[in-house]
Amino acid sequence: MMIPREYKGREQTYLKHRVLSEYLASWAQKIASTVRQGQSVKLWYVDCFAGPWQARDEALDDTSVAIGLNVLEQTAETWRKKGFRIELAAIFVEKDKKSFSHLVEFLDGREGKHVEVTALHGEFGSFVDEINRLIQGDPAFLFVDPTGWKGVGMRNIAPLASMRRRDVLINVMFNHLNRFKDDRRSFLRDQMRDFFGLSDSDIPPALPEDELFALYRQQLQQKGGVRFAADLIIPHAEHERTWFRLVIGGHHPAVVELFRDVEKRICGAEAGEVRDEARGRGQFKLELGLNHVDSTYARRHDADLQAAPDDLLKLLERSPPQSFRELWPRILATRHITKADLSKEVWKLHAQSKLVLHNLEKGQRTARDENILSLPAERLSQGATPLALCRCGRGTTEHLRTNSRACLPWVDTQANVKHIHPLARPDGMQEYDLSRQPTSQGR
Ligand SMILES: C[S@@+](CC[C@H](N)C(=O)[O-])C[C@H]1O[C@@H](n2cnc3c(N)ncnc32)[C@H](O)[C@@H]1O
């Protein structure tokens, strides 16, 4: 693989742009496909800290401005060939005077003009209402890529990201943030609070990287108003340390599924090649036939693949039988694995009788969204009220404990839920309290 010339020496930016481009393309494609149901579709790309910034390519192809516009136009072109019209719009916000003139010159000079563009000169924070007024209820992808953390407080992200049909991708420049996050100077503490959306407390001191990002994701959900959040690591091209972390937020579980797929492709496969090349090892590895999966990604992925089965069993201990559809987004939010990886792990747990997979189809070999997962009866902890679900209505202890294909025994280990909520019950299943059930012999 050859890293494009204009990205030499700034390979991290190349990887950031690859994630942006791949995620945006799949997002746009998915939303555009609703045009088939007769709905009109208008896609918005909002570049909240647009630049152009450190561009070396005349056509600005190495900037998020051109990347965003190109992806939208390619999506519309795909659908145009199938006979459908997709409307496109983009908003660019830039504070710096010189960069803004360059931006406007570029936008004015673009050929074709298939995208309705708006360029806003000034602070991102001052345009939040204007952006919402322009987009209204249309689907929009927001890219937030500041030079540091100033002007990008959670209070500015929230009014935009909390609306439905919005995905937000935020670049957190960890390398920079890490140097100042524990600085006690009051202006910096205020800026950090603003960035994290902390109203009455500071970031806990000396917070390790992963916990810092767990806090950021939690704040993005609670204060930013998104349902799902996850992040990925873009490491320094030549050293084993995090450079950027890209954080995704959105309202549909598909957000995390797509994000983890993109992470595997870009941070796993492509980053491996890009970083090998940057370190002058590309040719050597190619000749030896060694694979290029990036070491930073591989370490995280492998450790998380090992940890994910325990996460899953713990979730099942705490709540009633759940469908795979409800479980995977919660695991993928924190673990750097794909949905396909997790589905295979679930199958292994099932084969080892560590959990029970219900409503399986003939020939199935991995877990699917509609499969219900429960703990096997022997994992019910002592002293708690064992509840069970049964479809056939016989409801004896023996039947419920042994007929694991039809019955879903689970336990309320918290001892604070007395019944399985009707909405959590798979269709047609009845609830039984095993501690009160007579055995069939006792009848
Ligand atoms: C990291 S650069 C953006 C790079 C661009 N997204 C890309 O990937 O090609 C950040 C840009 O935001 C601009 N900027 C800084 N603070 C800003 C603010 N508060 N509001 C809007 N733009 C700002 C800077 O002038 C700079 O051009």
Image (spheres, grey):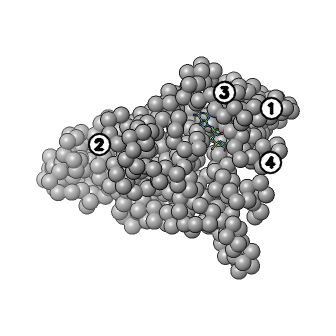
The secondary element bearing badge 4 is classed as loop
Residue marked by disc 3 = 121
Residue 177 coordinates in the image, percent (x, y): 49, 50
Q: Which residue is mark 4?
A: 57
Residue mark closest to the camera, 2 vs 3: 3
Q: CA distance from mark 2 to mark 3?
A: 67 Å
Image mark for residue 105: 1
Q: Earlier in the sequence, mark 2 or mark 1?
A: 1
Please tell me whether mark 3 sits on a helix, a strand or a loop: strand
Q: For the point 29% across and 52% down, which residue is it? A: 317
Q: Amino acid at mark 1?
A: Glu
For marks 1 and 3, give the CA distance.
13 Å
Q: Amino acid at mark 2?
A: Gly
Residue 30 visible at all? no
Q: Which residue shows up at 50% across the image and 30% down it?
A: 156
Mark earlier in primary sequence (3, 4): 4
Give the Cα separation between the discs numbered 3 and 4: 23 Å
Q: Residues within 10 Å of mark 2 (few under 14, many from 20)?
A: some
Of callouts 4 and 1, the N-terminal one: 4
